Amino acid sequence: MTKTIGVLTSGGDAPGMNAAIRAVTRVSCFRGYSVIGFERGWDGLLTNCYRKLTPRSVGGIIQTGGTILHTLRCSAFEQPQNQEIAAETLHKNNVDALVVIGGDGSFRGALELSRKSGVPMFGIPATIDNDVFGTDETIGFDTAVNTAVGAIDKIRDTAISHERIFIVEVMGRKRGFLALQVGICVGAEVVLIPEKPLDTPDVIKIMEANSGKGKRAGIIVAAEGFGDSNKLAQDMQQQTEAEVRLSILGYAQRGGSPTARSRLLASLFAEHAVDLISENKSNLSVGLQNGAIISVKLEVSARERKPLDLRLLRVAEMLAI
Ligand code: F6P
């Protein structure tokens, strides 16, 4: 029987979302299903706003950042009466399964909607924060790491020329996945993450010890969730001899052409999600674990906190001697 697959992107965008939309569409059409893409995340289900997706309509987007379906942080969707409206939209359009491309917040929304509608939901993890349980990596993370590394390499040049310390704040919401990987890749002197925060005196001690070792410049990579980087910069400037600058990388980390790795993950995740739909499975999220594409219960990936491997912090410290 021909199935109708719905797809949407929700929450903060991530490079590679378009590659995922493309792959969901093409693999579904390959299997003889039809696909509709809801616009602006959950809002498209509240307003019945969607477009039919075909193999041709998703052409030329694998290399583009952002999401052609647009996205939204949709607080209205948290209200039960609006979830009923969304359920009606799914039924009205005979949607047999909904693919939700986003983070764990979007997965929680999908679970609620599945309870209300009975429609099976499939999560494809996509966020630059890499903070979704059940997958070693999310779509967009690798691109964001590379964007931040490229920017910090440039900052390092000016840090060295002026013999300054730069605190560079990267995104990551309340987690330190992005900061830690970026920190190792740029050779940061200190990496500040919410999972193992350092006090200002500790940071100063490390930087002064570095100065004693002949390091005349330095990069501190700070996750946005670690604390107040502006205050840290001011305190360091006042309490030490060093010239300290703060650079907040911001939303550039969310855009840009996805790396090959983000495109590959998006394509493989989407293929697996459609595979699960064809097997009449229900409420799963796909992921990467130890190099294999797998699936876990959506309620687990939506609920559990993904652990951060703190051994990486130790590696960063050792490499910064
Ligand atoms: O979840 C992705 C992310 O970019 C986080 O790193 C950041 O904290 C947040 O989104 C910013 O959200 P908004 O787009 O709503 O400002």
Image (cartoon, rainbow, N blue to C red):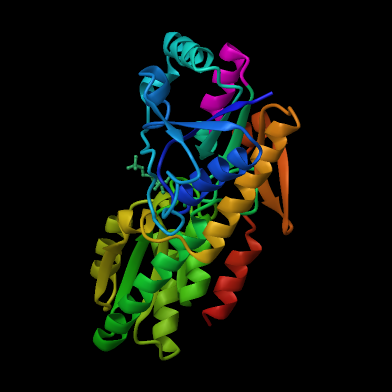
Q: Nearer the viewer, residue 136 or 221?
A: 136
Q: Nearer the viewer, residue 41 or 202?
A: 41
Q: Is residue 114 on the magenta stretch?
A: yes
Quarter of the N terminus within the rendering: top right
- x and y percentages locating residue 125 in the rendered image: 56, 44
Q: Is residue 23 visible?
A: yes
Asked where in the image residue 215 lies, by quadrant, the reply is bottom left
Q: Can residue 307 be seen in this view?
A: no
Give ligand 1's quarter of the image: top left
Q: In this view, does 174 lie to the left or right of 255?
A: right
Identity of the residue drawn at 56% across and 72% down: 316
- x and y percentages locating residue 276 in the rendered image: 71, 36
Question: Which residue is most to the bottom?
Answer: 214
Asked where in the image residue 188 lies, by quadrant, the reply is bottom left
Q: Give the range drawn in magenta.
A: 107-119
Q: Nearer the viewer, residue 25 or 233?
A: 25
Q: Is residue 126 left or right of residue 171?
A: right
- x and y percentages locating residue 9 in the rendered image: 45, 37
Identity of the residue drawn at 45% across and 67% down: 146
Q: Nearer the viewer, residue 74 or 216?
A: 74
Up the image or down, 139 lies above or below 300; here it is below
